[in-house]
Amino acid sequence: MAKGKKMQEVNFNSIDEFLAFLPEEELVIVERLRKLVFYCLPEAREKLSFNVPYYYHHRNFCFIWPASVTWGKKKTYEGVRFGFAYGNQLTDEINYLDKGGRKQIYWKDFKTVKEIDTELLQAYIYEAIIIDEEHFRKKKK
């Protein structure tokens, strides 16, 4: 990458800074998704990576990426992307998650809070947590 060329126009020092930056329509979606992650795993650690929240148990298992936090100079989607770091290991028989030609990271985009199917997304989050646990157990052996 050329010296001085940045892939992101923002640089947040905290989750609060990140949240304050978001337009209202994205903020309400982000807040709902954050609550859902912490409902599924209260002890999840939330850290900014690439200026968006990533959630960790033993390792990164999911992230929330609003479209207004761009990678590059322009928005490439609308709403808020909820992604799974190891989406390729999730059971997705109904093709709920978008793969976008990616090998590992899968996601679902939400343009409104009403689009969030809480029970279905919880099932995916719980499975991601189980995969994280299994990886940790195998690594300990």
Image (cartoon, rainbow, N blue to C red):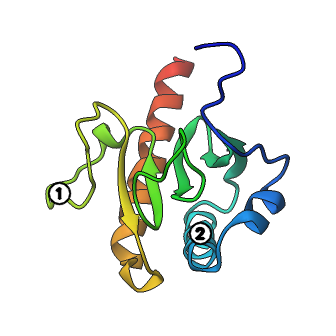
Q: Earlier in the sequence, mark 1 or mark 2?
A: 2
Badge count:
2
Amino acid at pointer 1: Asn
* Residue 2 position within the rendered picture, expressed as x and y whole percent measured from the top left: 62, 13
Q: Which residue is mark 2?
A: 30
Q: Is residue 113 above or below residue 39?
A: below
Q: Which residue is mark 1?
A: 95
Front in this rendered view, residue 107 or 43: 107
Q: CA distance from mark 1 to mark 2?
A: 23 Å
Front in this rendered view, residue 138 or 99: 99
Give the quarter of the image for residue 120. bottom left
Mark 2: secondary structure = helix
Q: Is residue 107 above or below residue 88?
A: below
Q: How dense is the environment of label 1, judged by Cα within 10 Å: few (below 14), some, or many (20 and up)?
A: few
Amino acid at pointer 2: Val
Mark 1: secondary structure = loop
Q: Residue at x 60, y 52 (%)?
A: 69
